[in-house]
Amino acid sequence: MKTKAAVLRNVGGPLVIEELEIPKLERGQVLVKILYSGLCRSQLNEINGRKGSEYIPHLLGHEASGIVIDIGKGVEKVKSQDYVVCSWIKGKGLDSPVVKYESDNGIVNAGAVATFTEFAVVSENRLVSISRKIEQEIASLLGCAVPTGAGIIDKINIQSGQNIAVFGIGGIGASALMRAVSLGVECVAFDVRLWKLEWVIETLDVRTIHSDDFNHRGLFDFAVECSGSKKAMELAFDCLKNTGTAIIAGNLEPGERIAIDPFELVKGKKLRGTWGGECFLDKDIPFYASEYLKGNFPVEKLITEVYSFAQINQGLQDLQAGRLIRGVVKIS
């Protein structure tokens, strides 16, 4: 069986759409027809070689909606025709981390989930079934943007009367803001792009500040950095009260470092990272899906643009240029 896929063949891209042979399912693997896949800055990091070039040629994509077509031995979590979310975040089930597709130009590597393809071989533990009431393009964002951003908010145990600053309003930052607003938390959004600040005001009715106009040290209980910017990471730490915590979700260039005053740590500030919002796939994704269906989490507002599969490189260019909150690609 063959599939059309967008393959990374060279550092810097572009992705090349070509036909691949789908490997026979091994234990713990699931064949999924991919419907929509989200575009995440993590893919830009992969394309630019920031996660290593030794796996190229490589398949990308780590958040998607899909339909289960077939299952391998040992798979019990999903069955044929289930409507699923695909995610890079691990959940219950068997782990099958390596997939190798064949092409006319040799092997194409993929990890446990790679969704820029019409049909994907996905590890059982990167899938979760959801309600068919959720639109396909919206379901795709439940694989990364929503559980990471919203998960950060839900895991910090923010209390009534506390506030939070969010730096970088992309898919993850916007999801964090959206979840915080739904919980009644006082928020301030920081970004360098005026149109994103306008989006925050119009969509979430949240106060915004241009990052270049930062003068807010010692004011926030929590800060979340989602931009991958050195300056934003340092500002997130600087803006905290002495009892505050900064959570870093973005990624710097390899070898790049941030600078903080260690005495601020002595005084009580905390600095930590996050891994997918500490999301537990099988519990949290159905929860956020339920919140969406109840009208408490308007995920559809995150989607700036829907691209055809043939337009996937344009979508990645728009992401790189800061033109998106979240873009999604209609795969099939």
Image (tube, grey):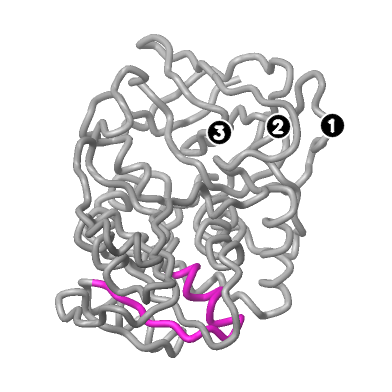
Q: Name the residue tied to disc 1.
A: 76
Residue 113: image tag: 3
Rendered residue at 32%/53% (across/down):
315
Residue 124: image tag: 2
Residue 94 sits in which quadrant? top right
Q: Earlier in the sequence, mark 3 or mark 2?
A: 3
Rendered residue at 50%/62% (across/down):
149
Residue type pointed to by label 1: Glu
Residue 270: percent from the left, percent from the top? 41, 61
Alpha carbon separation for disc pair 3 and 2: 9 Å
- Region rendered in magenta: 174-191
Residue 106: percent from the left, percent from the top? 39, 9
The reply, left or right, for residue 119 in relation to residue 197 is right
- 308 in magenta: no
Say which of 66 and 76 sits in front.
76
The reply, left or right, for residue 205 in relation to residue 132 is left
Q: Is residue 290 above or below residue 286?
A: below
Residue 91 sits in which quadrant? top right
Rendered residue at 69%/34% (across/down):
125
Say which of 123 and 22 sits in front.
123
Residue type pointed to by label 2: Glu
